[in-house]
Image (cartoon, rainbow, N blue to C red):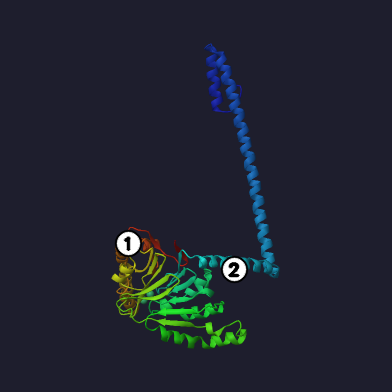
Amino acid sequence: MAFLHGGGDVEKNSLSCDFIISGHNSENCVTNLSKNRKQIIEKIYHSELSLLYQNNMKKIFRYALLLIGLLLLIGWIVTTFFPEKLVPMMLQQQLKRQIAQVEKNNQLLQDDESIYVYTVGTSAPLPGERVQTGTAVIVNGHFFMFDVGDGVVRRAENMGLPLNKLDGIFITHWHSDHFMDLSSMVSRTWLLGRTNDLHLYGPDGTDSINQSIKGYLHLENKHRVDHHGTQIMDISKARAIPHEFKNVQGGKEVVYQQDGITITAFDVDHEPIEPAVGYAIEYKGKKVVISGDTKKNDLVMEMAQNADLLLHEIILNSLLKEMESVISAQGLTRNAKIIHDIQDYHTPPSEVAEIAAKAKVKKLILHHFAPAPDFRVVKNLYKKELSGYDGPIVFANDGDLFIVK
Ligand SMILES: [Zn+2]
Ligand SMILES: [Zn+2]
């Protein structure tokens, strides 16, 4: 007996009902029939509901698309034909962002507990998106830069760092990827309104380079003062005050001690580049160590003992060797020679890992990459050779922040 032709299940149930009636169980049969009817009504109800839902969603989607299209069109018309209407709003937004950034920076500068470390630039002098070496440190009201390679000033400014509050620059050695932006940093911080003194710390060569910068910026500074006046542009701040240290050879020397902050320069092995140093920054029992450019070096290991952060340079010689032979085979002997030479005065991953493990550093930050670990294959090559250290390892990117609390 088929009372409704709603589908195969109904037919089957009805037939079994016929059988049940002839089998003397009519009460069960009636119950089954009403159950079936209920299920069918529910099915129809649900399918209609879902159809209605789908139609509504389509409508909403169409309206949303139309609305987005309309907004884009209005946006295009206003920005193209009436850009001046947007200027007040744009300036307000910009101002708001700047005020928020200044407030954030002031909070960091007022923090007398933590050390804030920014890897502003993380590249060795190889082409790529990353800028060259530069590390910013904010600690107990002071803002320091450790190295200022090419691109570091622009990157630091884009990051919103308080350049007009910079009060110390520490240079590890006089390779261009560590100081090419030095004159730019001195000048830019002044143009951005720096009213505090800016001190320049570095090994032999600091005085003469600082003198050169003064000469190099002489006309630029004069033009700014002539144009804006001495009230706005205080010429006495348009330069850095040099602090050249001479006694680090083979050892270490405290080069800065103020407000509970101790900064020690220590000799590293970047032969034939002399002098070359790394820096240890200590404050309230916290320690951050920057290796500078060096081969595996015992003094780095000693200085980095139990450091909260060790920022170490790194070179992937296993890849560079391959690169050297490929380039050499193409007859590019000059490039091949340079790639060959750089392999003997930096630290390969296995040795960086060894230093970090022996020094028991709490976190290893890799920077000054040669080459950059921006491709999965390259990064994994680095990782394979870093297995000797089982603490946390970070492949730093430009703009990363590390806080030691
Ligand atoms: Zn370098
Ligand atoms: Zn170097």
Left or right of 10 in this view: 287: left
Q: Residue 59's x, y, as percent?
A: 66, 47
| Label ID, residue 360 | 1
- Seen in the picture, residue 164 relative to 20 is either above or below; the reply is below
Q: Residues within 10 Å of mark 1 (few under 14, many from 20)?
A: many
Q: Does residue 149 show up?
A: no
Q: Residue 171's x, y, as percent?
A: 41, 77
Q: Residue at x 56, y 66 (%)?
A: 101
Instruction: Give the residue number, with chain letter if any, for mark 2.
Output: 98
Q: Secondary structure at mark 2?
A: helix
Write down which quadrant ligand 1 falls in: bottom left
Assign the C terminus to one quadrant of the image: bottom left
Q: Residue at x 60, y 87 (%)?
A: 226
Q: Does residue 260 show up?
A: yes
Q: Residue at x 68, y 69 (%)?
A: 87
Q: In this view of the protein, which residue sits in the foreground, 369 or 290?
A: 290
